[in-house]
Structures are given as structure tokens and as C-alpha cells.
Image: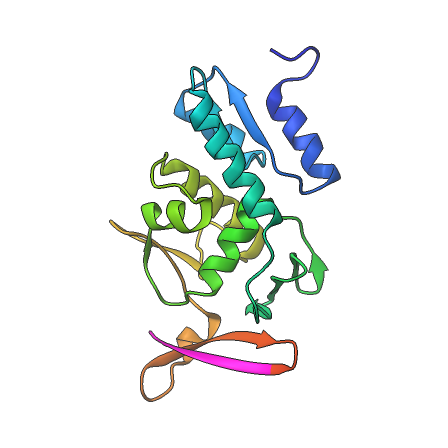
Amino acid sequence: MLPGLDGIEVCRRLREKAPIPVIMLTARGEEADRVAGLECGADDYVTKPFSPRELTLRVRSVLRRASEPPPTGSGILRAGTVIVDAAARTATRRGVPFGLTVREFDLLVFLLRHPGRALTRAELLEQVWGWTYGDPSTVTVHIRRLREKIEDDPTAPRLLVTVWGVGYRYDPPSAAQSDPAGRSRAVDEGASGSARRETPA
């Protein structure tokens, strides 16, 4: 136990200062506790007892995601009024910067790079978190937090949609205006200009 403040409040205050990686180690293992920890901005939530090997792997995973350089040609990603600079690790909505945790940022970038594709929670855990195991509610909580930050109405999402029985899918705003071939477009702009990807709707 922490003196004076609980871990949730400590994490919130850290998030107000900087987007540093945060892993919560706690004896509180109920689903509601895990959700609260992730919703306050933690990148991972580990319950006691845990093995030193598991903790080491999770720490390495979080640090790797926080420090690895972006892929070559990552460019600028757009989702309606949201603009994400993967190289600079910044995000704006209607021109106003907003904060994302390391995991939220990586998850958003991954989804924007795979428009129109239904992704399972297991796939997202492996591709974004680097885990081949883990609690799927981790993904659910991070999707919820992203919706609160990028959707006009988080209760009726139009960008990050739920695919029932599967997982989640990013639907580009242009999907409602398909071309005659039934394709929707997602924009991925490089530093030297615009490159437009076309993905089956």
C-alpha cells in the first residue's frame, strides 16, 4: 500500500506530467480493479502473486514499445479530424493536441494502418502489446479510452467500431462515400507528399 495516495491517483498524476510508461503491481485482481487501473492510464496491470520472469517480460515489452523508433515511412495518419504523427508520437483533434499513453498511441497507430480489417483482441494483444497471452479486457479498456478521445460520440462510435464476436475495426470516415468499386480510403501521408492506400471495404 502507498502512504497518502493510492496507485490509481499516482498514475493519474503521472499521466498529467508526461506520457511515461506505467506498470501497476497490485494485489487487487478483480476485473473492476484491472479496468480502473488501465482506465487511469496504466500501460499494464500485473496482479500479485506474479513470477519474476513474467514481470521482466512485461517490463521489457512496455519499454520496447516506448523506445522503439517508428517504422520507415510511417508518415502522417488521419482519421477524420484526428491527425497522428507516428514519427513524432503526437496526436491532434481539430488542431488541438491531446494526450495518449504509450499503449493507446501504439494501438491507435496500428488500427489506422489497418483500415477496414476486423482484428481480434488476441491479435491486438500480440501485435500492439507483444503478448501471446494476457487478459483481453486490457484491449477493451484501451479501445474505450481511445473512443473517449477521438470519437464525436463515444457511446456510438463511427471510427473504432465493435465487430461482435470478433473484436474491433477501424472504419475510415470516407467509408460512407465508397467509390464505384466499393472501396474506402485511408490516408497515410509521407514527409514528401501524400500517398493514398485503398483497402477493400
Count the marks: 0
Q: Residue at x 58, y 76 (%)?
A: 189
Q: Residue at x 38, y 81 (%)?
A: 178
Residue 165 drawn at (x, y percent)? 24, 49
Q: Which residues are magenta?
A: 194-201
Classify 163 as above or below 184: above
Instruction: Look at the image and say whether residue 182 sits in the magenta stretch.
Output: no
* Screen quadrant of the C terminus: bottom left
Q: Residue at x 63, y 83 (%)?
A: 193
Classify 93 as above or below 1: below
User: Foreground: 185 or 61?
Assistant: 61
User: Foreground: 42 or 57?
Assistant: 57
Most frequent secondary structure within the magenta stretch: strand
* Screen quadrant of the N terminus: top right
Residue 150 drawn at (x, y percent)? 56, 56
Residue 40 vs residue 56: left or right? right
Instruction: Look at the image and say whether residue 198 sits in the magenta stretch.
Output: yes
**Residue 3, quarter of picture:** top right
Residue 15 vs residue 187: left or right? right
Residue 194 drawn at (x, y percent)? 58, 82
Residue 76 drawn at (x, y percent)? 60, 70
Classify 60 as above or below 187: above
Q: Residue furthest bottom?
A: 180
Question: Does residue 10 appear anywhere in the picture?
Answer: yes
Question: Does residue 148 appear anywhere in the picture?
Answer: no
Residue 96 vs residue 130: left or right? right
Residue 12 vs residue 121: left or right? right
